Image (cartoon, rainbow, N blue to C red):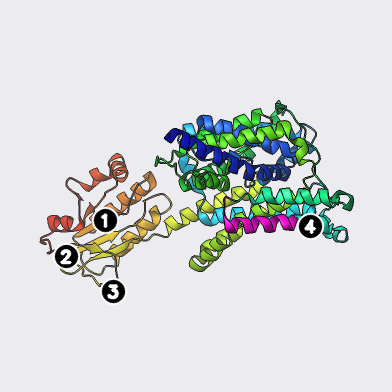
Amino acid sequence: MPGYAAFGRDVLTGLTLAAITIPEQMATARLGGFEPQIGFYAFVGATIGFALAGASRILTVGADSTITPIFAGALAALAASGTTTLASAAVTLALIVGALLIIGGTLRLGWIADLLSEPVVTGFLAGISVHIVVSQLPGLFGLAVGPGDMFGKLSAIATQLAAINPFSTGIGLGVLAIMLVSERISGRIPGALIALVLATLAVVAFDLQRRGVAVLGTLPGGLPHPVMPDLGLEDLRQLLPLALTVALVIMMQTAAVSHSFPDPGGRPPDIDRDFVGAGAANLVAGALGAMPVNASPPRTAVVAETGGVSQAGPLVAAALVLALVLFGGQLLAHVPEAALAGVLLFVAQRIFRLGTMVTIARQAPAEFALIALTAAAIIVLPIQAGVAIGIGLSLLHGVWMTTQTRPVEYRRIPGTTVWWPPDPHAPGELQPGVMVIGFQAPLLFANARTFQNGAAGLVSASGRPLALVVLEAGGIANVDYTAAMALRALIATCKASGADFAIARLESVRARQALDRFGILADLGPDKLFRSVQEAVATLTDATPAPR
């Protein structure tokens, strides 16, 4: 009976998921410049691929509005060059992305997902949301605007303001309003489907097509038609950097979804295997003639909230979507295009993390600049270039944070054996002839010179004769070659001034192995590695341990 109950929950999950997925996949396909059924094929293929190879039992994959704006413009430009078609370029990109994700998961590159900091991700999503809004304004206003970049579309819209269709605009804003209200009441309510049905009924009841409201028309039925890649070497060369960018964003989002929605059985996330699953999802989607796909936070949240316990729920949803493609194309004939614009406007406002921006601006103004710079790069430059700049900013920020660490002189808390950084509320004491230096960061090439010069400066500026210098290494998680040479130079400087040198609390196994490999422990001499600062002080001077 427990098995039947679990399957029943998965069936309910599949029904709910299908209701939310159908309008979303149609809208995302249109966002990429594809026919709506391509979104359905993408979801079906992605669901099958991830169910076969992924680790998470509740994560769902499909066409996604986060990655679609990244590749939509590039694929359209490639197709416009006449060397290939949009469908062939999309399939090729999906296959390359799938291969990259499988390679990444096999090589256990899950750590790559951590390369983007929260401010950079927030700025990236803000820029993407602006692109989504601008791309949907023609559909929302019922205007005929040709392909082009974001600023070209805004200029074209500005010249056609007098031709705005109020019925299309009302439909799009009405869909947006229904979705906002539905989400506020409960995430399980298929607000997009309800709004789409109401908009379609309005078009039919009031014959809005005669008033200029554009509709989808009958979708082609039947099974998907595989598309063979026909790109030349030059086209592939252009696609590879784009594929790397898309794969990195998919890794980032897949890891975030896996961590945010753990399996119901309590099994820890297996990020690397989920990368393989996302790769298989892209391969199958590409085989069905669709575009690249990504893990979906909102759809996965629906699976979790409705009690789904396995991939049976997404597979049920995929079966329903496939049935709609095969037999229900006529049902979508009168869906207004403005309604899909309303769906995407909802998506845009959802990924625009205003609350996170306000929090970061209040608590970390310098990091808010990362949000602004990343968003500006995504908006002004080609999106893939903006993503690359965001990644670079994230890495530079991490390196900058590392370089800001400075060596500090520790003091002993009176009446204890504890040596601690300076604290204005608990002044410590110095011991004659002894200096304890702490460095609370990994020792790397980026901060090696800062460490060496700072520690040597503390020694030379002490103003008292020193017999012993102790490096408190509790915060040093690793040491690279450049930093090891800086440490060797510091040890030589101290010994030249007549002070012995010791290292205490080197807790990191990796750091200790590095110091051994680089010969630092041999330079120190025997018995110069201690478990505590006070042990080093008591052993290498005439002092006795202070009471605890």
Q: Inspect the magenta stretch and tell me whether residue 180 lies in it.
A: yes
Q: Is residue 340 above or below residue 353?
A: above
- Residue 169 is marked as 4
Within 10 Å of disc 4 (Cα), the crowding (few <14, some 14-19, many 20+) is: many
Identify the residue at image location x=43%, y=41%.
269
Along the polypeptide, which appears first: circle 4 or circle 2? 4
Boundaries of the magenta span: 172-188
Determine whether label 4 and label 1 are within 8 Å by CB: no
Along the polypeptide, which appears first: circle 4 or circle 1? 4
What distance separates the C-alpha of mark 2 from that of mark 3? 16 Å
Q: Residue 287's spot in the image, x, y percent?
A: 65, 28
Left or right: residue 26 versus residue 216 is left
Q: Disc 1 marks which amino acid?
A: Leu
Q: Is residue 511 above or below residue 290?
A: below
Q: Disc 3 marks which amino acid?
A: His
Q: Which residue is mark 2?
A: 416
What distance separates the C-alpha of mark 1 from that of mark 3? 24 Å
Q: Which residue is mark 1?
A: 471
Front-lying residue, 167 or 243: 167
Element type at mark 1:
strand
Q: Disc 2 marks which amino acid?
A: Thr
